[in-house]
């Protein structure tokens, strides 16, 4: 079956779609009340983040827009030291969207929400004219434990910068689909609860965390350098990139420093805790390829020491990058 304008009417077809697909996969005690708004019990500091997902294609090697829209929002909450609790979703569907595909995407979203420990507490659907496309907005709420204080501004001279794994996988995967290049490159799309939980459970004094998404590591590190008033220096040789993505990037002239990811983060920790933090990250599923890639220092700007020993400054991503990567 295909989505038609009638599914956005608010009438019988909308109700049918709601029960057959959304209600079926998202059912929980808050959502099932079907009132005008979800009522949530929260106390203390909360983190709140919203993001819209327009990725194309809707399904790709290693993920899909349903999985991605949970990962993106949950990871943003995690990066503030929050424990993700609730998520809302707005589906904007184009006429002609296949309902079997829609159900796969909704099921994938529900599975990822379960894995990340978040409850889908509110949602909305709209139908617009178009060609079978789909856009999803998600908003997430997480609770910040009292003893956590994580911020881009907390990076200090001497701190070590650890990346959780290989860069560029999601970018290379999406681009491969678009260019119809066949390879085994999978998106790294994942929620990073395991890494963040492990760091805090082991008592690491995490100063800063950022997920390395659109704009890549280069952009994120420039933002941290600016916000914290530090100079950041990376070791090019230490930056992990898989051989497949390295080859793909070389052929297309892409720099992994600016390639997007959907399941990678950096943690900035005091130098004396860096080895312990690295070991902890490597013991998790999503951090098994973690590496210490550089240090913060007095000064400003972001620099990279190249394989040949030269030090050059790098800036944020300029221009387009890859449109509709997330
Ligand atoms: Mg982020």
Image (cartoon, rainbow, N blue to C red):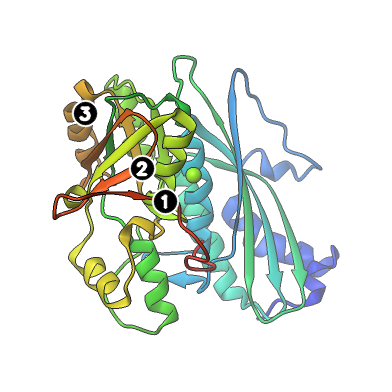
The disc at residue 302 is 2
Q: Residues within 10 Å of mark 1 (few under 14, many from 20)?
A: some
Position in image of residue 244 (x %, y %)? 22, 69
The disc at residue 253 is none
Q: Are marks 1 and 2 in contact (CB under 8 Å)?
A: yes
Q: How far apart are the two marked residues, 3 and 1, measured between alpha carbons?
A: 25 Å
Camera-nearest label, 3 or 2: 2
Callout 1 secondary element: loop
Residue drawn at x 56%, y 41% as measured from the top left: 119
Residue placed most toward the observer, 186 or 6: 186
Q: Is residue 61 visible?
A: no
Q: Can residue 295 be seen in this view?
A: yes
**In this figure, which residue is indicated by the disc labeled 1?**
315
**In this figure, which residue is indicated by the disc labeled 3?**
274
Q: In which quarter of the image is residue 115?
A: top left
Who comes first in sequence, dot 1 or dot 2?
2
Q: From the image, which quarter does the N terminus lie in?
A: bottom right
Residue drawn at x 24%, y 39% as measured from the top left: 294
Q: How crowded is mark 2: few (under 14 residues within 10 Å), some or many (20 or more)?
A: many
Q: How far apart are the two marked residues, 3 and 2, measured between alpha carbons?
A: 20 Å
Q: Quadrant of residue 221?
A: top left
Work out whether 60 lies above or below 125.
Answer: below
């Amino acid at each position: 079956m295909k989505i038609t304008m009638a599914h956005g009417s608010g009438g019988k077809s909308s109700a049918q779609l709601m029960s057959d697909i959304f209600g079926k996969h998202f059912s929980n005690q808050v959502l099932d009340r079907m009132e005008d708004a979800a009522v949530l019990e929260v106390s203390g500091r909360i983190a709140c983040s919203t993001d819209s997902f327009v990725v194309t294609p809707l399904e790709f090697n290693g993920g899909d827009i349903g999985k991605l829209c949970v990962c993106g929002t949950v990871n943003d909450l995690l990066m503030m030291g929050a424990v993700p609790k609730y998520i809302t979703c707005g589906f904007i569907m184009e006429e002609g969207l296949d309902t079997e595909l829609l159900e796969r995407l909704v099921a994938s979203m529900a599975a990822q929400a379960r894995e990340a420990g978040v409850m889908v507490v509110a949602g909305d659907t709209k139908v617009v004219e178009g060609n079978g496309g789909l856009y999803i907005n998600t908003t997430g709420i997480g609770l910040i434990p009292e003893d956590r204080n994580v911020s881009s501004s907390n990076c200090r001279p001497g701190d070590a910068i650890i990346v959780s794994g290989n860069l560029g996988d999601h970018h290379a995967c999406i681009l491969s689909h678009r260019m119809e290049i066949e390879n085994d490159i999978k998106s790294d799309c994942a929620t990073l609860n395991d890494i963040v939980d492990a760091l805090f459970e082991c008592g690491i004094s995490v100063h800063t965390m950022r997920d390395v998404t659109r704009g890549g590591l280069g952009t994120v590190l420039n933002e941290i350098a600016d916000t914290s008033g530090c100079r950041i220096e990376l070791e090019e040789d230490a930056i992990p990139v898989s051989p497949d993505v390295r080859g793909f990037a070389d052929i297309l002239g892409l720099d992994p420093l600016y390639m997007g990811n959907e399941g990678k983060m950096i943690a900035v920790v005091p130098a004396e805790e860096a080895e312990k933090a690295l070991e902890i990250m490597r013991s998790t599923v999503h951090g098994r390829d973690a590496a210490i890639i550089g240090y913060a220092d007095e000064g400003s700007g972001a620099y990279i020491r190249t394989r040949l020993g030269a030090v050059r400054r790098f800036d944020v991503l300029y221009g387009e990058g890859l449109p509709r990567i997330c």
